Image (cartoon, grey):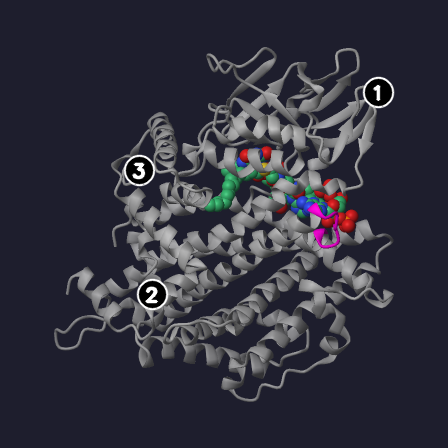
Amino acid sequence: MEALDYHAEERRKAEFDVEEMKIVWAGSRQAYEISDRVARLVASDPVFRKDNRTMLSRKDLFKDTLRKAAHAWKRIIELRLSEEEASKLRFFVDQPVFTDLHWGMFIPAIKGQGNEEQQQKWLPMAYKMQIIGCYAQTELGHGSNVQGLETTATFDPETDEFVIHSPTLTSSKWWPGGLGKVSTHALIYARLITDGQDHGVHGFIVQLRSLDDHLPLPGITVGDIGMKFGSGAYNSMDNGVLRFDHVRILRDQMLMGVSQVTREGKFMQSDVPRQLVYGTMVYVRQKIVADASCALSRAVCIATRYSVVRRQFGSHNGGPETQVIDYKTQQSRLFPLLASAYAFRFVGEWLKWLYTDVTQRLQASDFSTLPEVHACTAGLKSVTTSATADAIEECRKLCGGHGYLSSSGLPELFAVYVPACTYEGDNVVLLLQVARFLMKTVSQLGSGKKPVGTIAYMGRSEHLLQCRCEVERAEDWLKPNVILEAFEARAARMSVTCAKNLNNFANQEEGFAQLATDLAEAAVAHVQLIIVSKFIEKLQQDIPGKGVKRQLEILFNVYALSLLHKHLGDFVASGCITPKQGALANEQLRLLYSQVHFDNPSLLLYMVLLLERLLQSTSF
Ligand SMILES: CCCCCCCCCCC/C=C/C(=O)SCCNC(=O)CCNC(=O)[C@H](O)C(C)(C)COP(=O)(O)OP(=O)(O)OC[C@H]1O[C@@H](n2cnc3c(N)ncnc32)[C@H](O)[C@@H]1OP(=O)(O)O
Ligand SMILES: Cc1cc2nc3c(=O)[nH]c(=O)nc-3n(C[C@H](O)[C@H](O)[C@H](O)COP(=O)(O)OP(=O)(O)OC[C@H]3O[C@@H](n4cnc5c(N)ncnc54)[C@H](O)[C@@H]3O)c2cc1C
């Protein structure tokens, strides 16, 4: 049988409403229709072809990227695409490019941190792409430690200007995407100095290149930082280096939404938290979580299609060999990844809601949910990108030798995706931010302040610290409440243990340094609980379509029980479940895989196949 016949055969067996499942994945019928229409538009346009890009030299790849970006912009204008459609179009073009930073960070930073006047001045030019901006925060010496940035912005009251300067080699801006070749402007982060006093890191808009001839302006040294990991991949982006030699900008080019400097040079802090200067990172982390399910679904789609077509061993009397998808080991490696794609999809939807909610609250000067939103975006960004990066590599292995070929799509996907574990906050650094939030929550438990939202479960920690799981048979693990309580008990116990152990140190800082590994693990447990609980909430919604909910329930159980199996040590050590119950969870997991594949043939497989339009350049 030909590969296509195998796929058709698997599709034919689907026992659920495929159209409805597509809508669940997209989030709404409208979102699905937009996605489908824009995907076709991109796939049918020869300018957007991508099958040759791993073979292009850096220079040709970069030219190809510029051509695509210009063509994308032309199509967006010609077709009068909405913001949502335009962003989908860029998504399907699927090639890292300077516009990601222009639309994804430069504009959001001005919106989030600029005052009304500044927004009116800069945004219309940015929306029309008359200026192109990047986000220049990281320096050669400091990326994670934002407070350690060295670039200075010194106010000169005589001229009403800031003098932007790079005082050391390590203060050179290093990494910003779009900076190396393209950007005309940058949102730079620098230490604000007025009257000899350092007020910490703030954002400033600086013009880098002439709008006439694109040459760097006086005092600016700028360039590309060179080749990055993998062929093709992120090399389409002009990540750059930037140095300032006493460059002067007007006072109103400091973003003044959070703090201001007056004409007299007086520093004024608004009554908003200073952390709002970090707001753009929160916004992008939330986007990155939404994006994780897309990257993961692509990899899983490739590996599943391959596993259906590929046959190894097991021929009887000259008959066909066994499809590799029928091997238990293949299933136990692949199905949890498929389940994770759906889990990340749903938690991403919820995070988008949380982010919209905090934005509305901030506009009404309600800052109460900011710490939770920071912890959720940081933690989910960390856990989903780490899992996705690992999953892409696992999918490569699931495709045997063929997975190592560029034409499988997996090497390029991996090379493009893995920096997500580093940019927008190194994943370990971000987990430690979550841990900080958790320790603060535990320390306030006796104070009468009731934990709410994603940490509401901590309010039941007395119960969670001593509860015992009641599972007696494998099928007991199919009850959402049983799973939820096991995850809550594990997360609460790990946090409380860390908090107790911190008391053994002379001070909190020393304790944090010594217990960092345990703290990061407690953060992972908390974040996995969030993902599990949001999946359960999704299943409590009305989900139309024959068999759709049932399939999602199977995926939920696969997701939760595979995590439980992987982290069994944590679950058992925290005392809520016994090793025997852990073994029953594993037994149930095996049954789920079998159920998926034999009683209910190919259901999961079909769910992957319907995502195939995402794969425009892969060939299995
Ligand atoms: C189709 C869509 C695709 C998706 C689009 C993807 C495109 C992406 C392209 C990639 C581009 C990449 C860009 C970048 O990488 S930009 C640079 C990003 N850099 C970082 O992320 C740096 C990470 N470091 C930090 O964020 C901070 O330095 C850190 C939080 C680690 C520490 O900051 P600081 O020293 O100031 O803080 P403390 O730990 O002392 O904390 C002080 C309090 O502030 C709270 N806090 C910290 N951060 C935030 C925040 N963002 N929001 C709200 N609150 C925050 C922190 O919890 C502390 O609170 P408490 O005092 O109450 O404990
Ligand atoms: C592809 C790509 C695109 C990027 N785009 C941009 C951009 O557009 N704009 C921009 O400003 N920046 C950008 N960056 C920079 C990025 O944000 C930083 O690289 C990132 O924040 C990590 O900082 P770092 O490089 O200083 O890592 P480091 O902090 O040096 O990390 C090195 C190691 O130290 C560990 N570590 C650091 N601090 C701690 C700690 N407190 N406790 C425990 N371990 C710690 C980390 O876990 C890591 O293992 C980009 C980076 C990449 C790779």
Of pointers 1 and 3, the one earlier in the residue sequence: 3
Q: Which residues are magenta?
A: 363-370
The residue carrying mark 1 has its beta carbon less than 8 Å from ligand 1: no
Residue shown at 30%/37% (left/top)? Answer: 48
Q: Residue furthest left?
A: 318
Indicate the secondary structure of the residue bearing disc 2. helix
Left or right for 430, reference 35: right
Q: Is label 1 in a helix, a strand or a loop? A: loop
Residue closer to the observer: 283 or 152? 283
Mark 3: few/some/many CA within 10 Å (<14, 14-19, 20+)? many
Q: Which numbered tag is attached to residue 19?
A: 2
Image depth: mark 2 or mark 3 in front? 2
- Residue kind at label 2, given as amino acid type: Glu
Mark 3 — residue? 48
Marks 2/1: CA distance?
64 Å
Q: Amino acid at mark 3?
A: Phe
Q: Residues within 10 Å of mark 1 (few under 14, many from 20)?
A: few
Q: Is residue 522 found left or right of 477 in the rendered image?
A: right
Residue 5 versus residue 230 in the image, above or below? below
Dot 2 or dot 3: first in sequence order is: 2
Q: Which residue is mark 1?
A: 195
Say if mark 1 contacts mark 3, CB within 8 Å: no
Q: Which residue is nearer to you in this view: 69 or 338?
A: 69
Mark 2 to mark 3 CA distance (whole Å): 27 Å
